[in-house]
Image: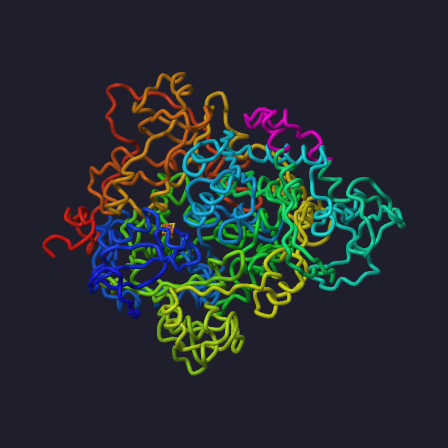
């Protein structure tokens, strides 16, 4: 337990830690009376939220009192069917014994038969290390379902992305454009920033099919049809290029816009950037020896040649006869026909509005130029006296990402931001360390089945960043090696894996059967997969021999979610207030624009019952299995427990790099890098659980090309190399895959049935096409797009067991524009059917002007299965709440079978692509939701809701 400080209010005392009621990770103060939590508020000293707390954060207290808390390890009762929810309590010793024996057997034979998939956990550096040490490639978190397109599309273009990777500089922006963002991701900091931005007179435009949350306070709402954002962005790029409203100077120096692309269609190098064989590569992994066409000398010269003035447009011929064009010329040709009129017919946004928005972006960037008096030196040694800014900032998230055409849409957004000259500049987009990363980042996943061997750790992490076909994880015939088929020709850049396909593939035995599926914090049997009803059937299905198709399922969770019912073994996790935890620079820290920030959680109350943090479970299992990184040479365990592991683990012996970068070194006086410090946890606890390293001002901008920053980042091992990270207007990575699909280059090539798919989607320039699902849907019969949003007051499925937050949302409606409702004969609050080609649900309609007419939408994961989360069988969540995922296909029909409903580049689930129709329920139908499922039995160790806790506000619980 951590030391506490005297509180301001009487006998209460205060402990600081980090919130986990959503993924934002604000600093909080927990006010305690002994070991009883009285209330939680925001920590004013914390750099992220500066004392602000939201409804979820303040309601963390009710998580402690949740009736759904799992409190002891559980085993499915002998003879009970999986899914029936019949469990018996067992000891941790039994649980560990059972798991160790099973996992040791798998590891000694075929480690990939163990699959570990996690939800929105904040410890992927540890879960990833465990999987690597175990030797299984079958590991990922939930990113493939959430927003991997946002991460991949941006990182493959500018080396960074939104949210914890980077974001809008609203302190200096004049125009803020939010596109495809709901009430989630980076919640409190964004609210604080938008409030200040508006007070300072900034203009806020929200482009979204729905006007809620942030959009509700926008100065202008631009409704758009879901999944068509790519068309809008290409039309805006068209306008900027047509009107000359782009930042030429920025593009020339800091992107590959001026680099020459080989345009000889007969060449094996067609579409690749031409290298200057006379110039040194400098770094073969990220060669710098490309060419510009110099307008002054009218010849090709090495890029960044002093005094050269490269052409961005035109067609040229090299001295060896090779026809070439600058990358920007090719972009210009791509968007030539992407006029505002063209985009208007797709997006539903009037052409005049698109033109006006493009003009406003270009003019604001050009005419409100910022010059900060900060001297810095670029990667080519040129000294600059000021940092220039272009005050147009963007923010985007899942609304753009969760479509099977999302990767190219997000490439278009990143290129638009680059044309405006806003990357890592004041008033625009700014990175948060450790970003920017190289393009692509240098970490690679395994690339051959031979890299998976019994009793042997993987040579690399299970997830990485492919640079070309040679980095795919396929066998000699081009078939996938991972259970989710990640990094195969189906989804070559699946950098976050495909959690949503694990159950289907394991059930089908395609590419193979597995033995044990361990799920941490992921509600795969409800809202974390598509096609929910079928997934639930698969989890219970048996083969011809009467064996479960997925033989053993382990679920680790804090609460009795829908997925718990399908477990063979349940491991009770703690709440975030009961454990140590780290938000590490090795994983997903909470950095600020001005420097790295990592933080911790420390226990403020003891664990309930026999709950054990999953971190401790992994350390214990790793020690019992004698995984090398967790074991000394003499075979004894290296780490006592998780806190001990965090202090003493180094990425390589003696590297000085560990999970935490604050207060390192034996005396705690080193930062970022240094030997382990036995007092590190105490130093964090004494400092509001957060470490903030502020970079000198000259390192805070232009970091893709900032010599000083790059050298510092390499010194402290945030980066492997210090090369500049040029913006990829033209993506050579994409072209390498396309050339392989065209059979133009030696080496790996896709299997015949996937050649056309890879060739089409791996376009080095962004393009717009309908999503896979929309392209095969009968738009006459299913004319409406159906999407979900995460509510501000609840995080994923977690909060329906929270007595306070249930008062905000206990059931959900389908929101329908009144015009659309009228045409369908639907009134306010009427019970209706929503039908897609894949299924139907019965729910209540709520008429709303705040949704564009061809879209219907609902809150995500408010609807629950009966009895889940320990709600009563007749709770509103299961009787009137509904889940849209029942309507969404996990797989789509295709020639010769089915294919995952996922982006063909990244594997991102296309769960915002479904099309539906709506019609009134018959008058004699019950006023309850459908489909319904048999009510879940209460798990042993959970308890019935106690009304006095639900009434608890501030002060002693009555009678306690
Ligand atoms: S925004 Fe998220 S992390 Fe911050 S207080 Fe609210 S729930 Fe907690």
Question: Is residue 513 visible from the viewing direction of this image?
Answer: yes
Residue 272 position (above or below residue 333):
below
What is the magenta range? 333-359
- Is 717 placed left or right of 869 in the picture? right
Q: Position of residue 520 (x, y in %)?
A: 37, 56
Residue appearing at x 41%, y 41% in the figure: 183
Question: Is residue 78 visible from the viewing direction of this image?
Answer: no
Q: Where is residue 400 in the image (x, y as percent from the top left)?
A: 52, 39
What secondary structure do most residues of the magenta stretch adopt?
Answer: helix
Residue 45 position (above or below residue 168):
below
Q: Does the magenta stretch include residue 576?
A: no
Q: Is residue 349 magenta?
A: yes
Q: Which residue lies furthest to the left in this view?
A: 959
Q: Position of residue 713 (x, y in %)?
A: 59, 65
Q: Nearer the viewer, residue 712 or 768?
A: 712
Q: Where is residue 844 in the image (x, y as percent from the top left)?
A: 31, 27
- Is 123 placed left or right of 437 in the picture? left
- Is 544 placed left or right of 754 in the picture? left
On the rendered image, what quadrant is the N terminus found in? bottom left
On the rendered image, what quadrant is the C terminus found in? bottom left
Q: Nearer the viewer, residue 85 or 126?
A: 126
């Amino acid at each position: 337990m951590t030391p506490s400080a005297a509180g301001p209010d009487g006998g209460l005392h205060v402990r600081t830690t980090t919130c986990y009621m959503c993924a934002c990770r604000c600093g909080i103060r927990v006010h305690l009376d002994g070991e009883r939590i009285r209330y939680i508020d925001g920590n004013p000293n914390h750099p992220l939220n500066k004392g602000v707390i939201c409804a979820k954060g303040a309601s963390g207290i009710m998580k402690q009192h949740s009736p759904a808390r799992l409190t002891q390890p559980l085993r499915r009762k002998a003879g009970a069917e999986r899914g029936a929810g019949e469990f018996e309590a067992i000891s941790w010793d039994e649980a560990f014994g059972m798991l160790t024996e099973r996992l040791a057997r798998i590891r000694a034979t075929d480690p990939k038969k163990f699959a570990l998939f996690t939800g929105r956990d904040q410890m992927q550096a540890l879960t990833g290390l465990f999987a690597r040490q175990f030797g299984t490639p079958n590991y990922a978190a939930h990113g493939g379902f959430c927003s991997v397109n946002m991460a991949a599309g941006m990182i493959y273009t500018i080396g960074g992305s939104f949210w914890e990777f980077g974001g809008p500089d609203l302190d200096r922006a004049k125009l803020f454009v939010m596109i495809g963002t709901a009430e989630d991701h980076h919640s409190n900091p964004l609210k604080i920033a938008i409030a200040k931005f508006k007070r300072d007179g900034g203009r806020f435009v929200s482009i979204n099919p729905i006007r809620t949350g942030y959009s509700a306070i926008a100065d202008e709402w631009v409704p758009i049809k879901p999944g068509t954002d790519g068309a809008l962005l290409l039309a805006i790029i068209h306008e900027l290029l047509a009107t000359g409203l782009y930042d030429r100077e920025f593009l020339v120096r800091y992107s590959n816009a001026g680099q020459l692309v080989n345009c000889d269609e007969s060449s094996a190098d067609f579409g690749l950037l031409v290298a200057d064989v006379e110039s040194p590569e400098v770094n073969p992994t990220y060669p710098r020896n490309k060419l510009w066409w110099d307008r002054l000398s009218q010849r090709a010269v090495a890029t960044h040649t002093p005094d050269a003035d490269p052409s961005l447009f035109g067609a040229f011929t090299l001295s060896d006869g090779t026809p070439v064009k600058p990358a920007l010329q090719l972009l210009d040709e791509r968007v030539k026909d992407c006029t505002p009129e063209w985009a208007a017919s797709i997006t539903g946004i009037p052409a005049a509005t698109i033109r006006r928005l493009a003009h406003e972006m270009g003019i604001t960037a050009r005419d409100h130029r910022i010059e900060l008096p900060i001297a810095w030196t670029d990667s080519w040694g040129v000294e600059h006296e000021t940092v220039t800014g272009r005050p147009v900032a963007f923010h985007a998230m899942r609304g753009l990402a969760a479509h099977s055409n999302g990767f190219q849409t997000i490439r278009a957004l990143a290129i638009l931001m680059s044309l405006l000259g806003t990357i890592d500049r004041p008033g625009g987009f700014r990175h948060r360390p450790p970003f920017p990363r190289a393009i692509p980042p240098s970490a690679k996943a395994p690339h051959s089945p031979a890299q998976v061997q019994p009793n042997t750790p993987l040579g690399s992490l299970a997830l990485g960043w492919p640079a070309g076909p040679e980095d795919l994880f396929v066998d000699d015939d081009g078939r996938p090696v991972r259970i989710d088929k990640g990094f195969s020709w189906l989804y070559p850049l699946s950098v976050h894996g495909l959690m949503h396909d694990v159950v289907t593939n394991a059930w089908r035995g395609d590419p193979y059967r597995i033995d044990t599926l361990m799920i941490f914090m992921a509600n795969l049997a409800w809202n974390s997969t598509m096609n929910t009803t079928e997934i639930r059937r698969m989890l219970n299905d048996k083969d011809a021999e009467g064996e479960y198709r997925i033989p053993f399922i382990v679920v680790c969770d804090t609460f009795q979610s829908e997925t718990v019912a399908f477990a063979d073994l349940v491991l009770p996790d703690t709440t975030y207030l009961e454990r140590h935890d780290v938000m590490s620079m090795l994983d997903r820290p909470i950095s600020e624009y001005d420097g790295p920030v990592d933080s911790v959680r420390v226990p403020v109350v003891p664990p309930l019952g026999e709950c054990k943090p999953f971190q401790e479970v992994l350390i214990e299992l790793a020690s019992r299995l004698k995984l090398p990184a967790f074991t000394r040479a003499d075979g004894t365990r290296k780490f006592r427990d998780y806190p001990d592991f965090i202090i003493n683990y180094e990425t390589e012996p003696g590297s000085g790099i560990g999970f935490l970068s604050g207060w390192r070194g034996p005396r705690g006086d080193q930062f970022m890098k240094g030997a382990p410090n036995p007092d590190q946890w105490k130093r964090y606890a004494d400092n509001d659980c957060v470490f903030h390293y502020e970079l000198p001002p000259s390192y805070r901008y232009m970091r893709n090309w900032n010599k000083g920053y790059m050298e510092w980042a390499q010194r402290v091992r945030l980066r492997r190399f210090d090369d500049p990270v040029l913006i990829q207007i033209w993506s050579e990575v994409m072209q390498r895959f396309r050339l392989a699909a065209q059979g133009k280059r030696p080496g790996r090539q896709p299997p015949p049935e996937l050649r056309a798919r890879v060739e089409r989607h791996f376009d080095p320039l962004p393009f717009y096409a309908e999503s896979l699902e929309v392209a095969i849907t009968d738009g006459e019969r299913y004319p409406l797009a159906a999407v979900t949003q995460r509510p501000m007051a609840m995080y994923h499925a977690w909060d329906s067991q929270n007595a306070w937050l249930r008062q905000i949302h206990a059931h959900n409606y389908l929101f329908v524009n009144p015009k659309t409702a009228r045409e369908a004969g639907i009134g306010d609050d009427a019970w209706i059917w929503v039908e897609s080609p894949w299924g139907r649900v019965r729910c209540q309609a709520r008429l709303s002007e705040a949704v564009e007419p061809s879209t219907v939408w609902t809150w995500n994961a408010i609807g629950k299965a009966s009895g889940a989360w320990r709600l009563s069988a007749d709770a509103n969540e299961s009787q009137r709440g509904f889940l849209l995922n029942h309507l969404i296909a996990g797989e789509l029909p295709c020639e010769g079978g089915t294919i995952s409903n996922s982006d063909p580049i990244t594997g991102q689930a296309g769960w915002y692509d479904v099309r539906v129709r709506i019609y009134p329920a018959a008058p004699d139908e019950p006023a309850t939701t459908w489909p319904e499922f048999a009510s879940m039995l209460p798990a042993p160790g959970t308890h019935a809701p106690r009304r006095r806790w639900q009434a608890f506000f501030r002060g002693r619980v009555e009678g306690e």
